[in-house]
Amino acid sequence: MTPQISSLLVANRGEIAVRIFRTARDLGLATVAVHSDPDADALHVRAADAAVRLPGAGPADTYLRGDLVIKAALAAGADAVHPGYGFLSENADFARQVQDSGLTWIGPPPEAIEAMASKTRAKELMRAAGVPLLDPVDPATATPADLPLLLKAAAGGGGRGMRVVRDLDALKEALRAASAEAVSAFGDGEVFAEPYVERGRHVEVQILADAHGTVWALGTRDCSLQRRHQKVIEEAPAPGLPDTLRESLHAAAVAAARAVSYRGAGTVEFLVTADGRPYFLEMNTRLQVEHPVTEAVFGLDLVALQLRVAEGAALPLTPPQPTGHAVEARLYAEDPAQDWRPQTGVLHTLDIPGQVRIDTGFTGGDTVGIHYDPMLAKVVAHAPTRAEAVRALAHALAGARIHGLTTNRELLVGSLRHPEFGAAQLDTGFYDRHLAALTETAPDAGTAALAAALAEAAPAPDAPLAARLGGWRNVRSQPQTRRYTSAGSEYEVQYHPVDHPGVRVLSAERHLVTLEVDGIRRMFHVKRNSNNTEVYVDSALGAHTLTPVPRFPDPQDRTEPGSLLAPMPGTVVRVADGLAPGSHVTAGQPLLWLEAMKMEHRILAPASGTLTALHAVTGQQVEFGALLAVVQEEPQP
């Protein structure tokens, strides 16, 4: 008989660890966290009853060290290990080691993980089970007729180690890059190729199985809106599927689970073509990031069910009936307009209003570092209809106050309110078509700059009473001037306390300014970061981050023309072959490859010319803004 669990270690970090701890507490379990050195004060550590340090910073030295995780569990008195998702969650050897150590493994049998761990082997298994598949393509013999191709890491997921190839001349470099990224993320560089389906839908089925022969198919999810092959918005159920297709997907998912004697929670993923033909992609032998939408629709706690199944409990023969519709958006610290560039630094404020579920690993004041995925939170809305759920989620995100880092919040709101998304016209090419429009410059920040200047000039709450009562009654003969930059534009504000063209000041305090703009009353919430280098202004007109312009700029702040600066902290993983001072480069040529937050980013030549300086070497750790190289542009004829 499987022993009852009393203390649970989560072999993970961030929002998924916090989410699992929440259920564990509800079930009366003691909780144990593990953490790297950068995560010593992270929210998941603060949320646990006990925590054990994994010395080091990067995943390879910490969260991917199964031996250290098991040692931590035994030392802290835990009797079970939940892997979350990512890291060691689909590592069959780790699952065996957990069990061999006398601990309960919260996941499927190691044999099932092993069978599905390699996408190539999993497809062979699914073919034998009668599940439809895309035929693989041998990259060594690929022809133009095989294009476009999708390269995929055999051992991984989450979009890492994936590349779309549309030109055979680019295939060799794409294979190298995909393999290198796969080694970094999963420790396995195997990559395979298959046809890339244009405008396909990514549809998946959540399954849950016990040790007594019951397998649930808990509906479908649509995860078609993706960037870099990583999901951005997910929903349940997948809208617009014919009943026959939905039933066939359920049957194929159950067949996949039974083929490997599955137990616990898992997901079977499919690609559905524009004409409605489904093809098996992979089976994820773990909990998915997007599991909350299924929980909302079915009224279940999948983590609680994972724990009960691990204790040997039997599921009811049939799952509960689904109700309503749920939509999830992944809020990332990244800049979609700059090739989805991840952001690092202090998250000063994270406040999301509304009747929505928020799964997060951060609170205001926490730091987003360079070593891990930049997802800040998952925000989920559930409502009787799809339209209501989408509207509620968009409204909550639009009203959120997120200060300190550039995020994809505006992209999420624009996506949810896009006519194609509203009409459930979903496919994986959504951002290929609409990214430029969805990342257009934010609304004019002029009024926000005015509100920031008025707030700055307002008397402090602890100022003498006379100043607080009379501060806005004495109109200066000359206007005051403040200058700010926002999204690359500069705004100069000249203001009187009570007199502005088209604007009437109704009240102005340090953190709240109320203006009547063209006859409409609007409230502007103003907050400064701790060192007063940025001002955040939130209103119904949009969110703006303003940088005060010093009256006397430091001439040392200037950089040499053609300087290539590190767009983020990271590690130089490659320098172009033969690149050295004096080399001729062409505009757009990749010069350096920088790895940050598990993704590889190319540093391109800004213009054609001569490389006059090269300060980066392979393996070097660089900070944001570090000078990597200098290209002197060649004269135009």
Image: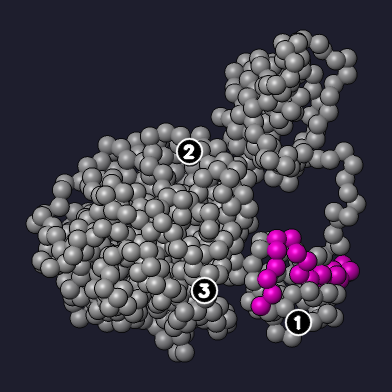
**Which circle marks residue 352 in the picture?**
2
- Of circles 1 and 2, the one toward us is 2
Foreground residue among 147 and 555? 555
Residue type at mark 1: give it. Answer: Leu
**Residue 498, quarter of picture:** top right
Q: From which residue to which does the magenta span run? A: 619-637
Percent position of residue 338, x then y: 63, 57
Task: Find numbered disc 3 in the image and state the secondary structure of the residue it sits on.
Answer: helix
What residue is at 37 percent from the left and 72 percent from the top? 70
Q: Which residue is mark 3?
A: 61
C-alpha separation, residue under disc 1 versus residue under disc 2 = 47 Å
Q: Amino acid at mark 2?
A: Ile
The amino acid on which the numbered mark 3 sits, given as a three-letter code, is Asp
- Label 3: how many residues lie within 10 Å, few (<14), some (14-19) or many (20+)? some
Residue beneath disc 1: 579
Please provide percent x and percent y for residue 371. Answer: 56, 64
Q: Earlier in the sequence, mark 2 or mark 3?
A: 3
Q: CA distance from mark 2 to mark 3?
A: 34 Å
| Quadrant (top left/top right/bottom left/bottom right) for the C terminus | bottom right
Are the residues tagged 1 and 2 within 8 Å (C-beta)?
Answer: no
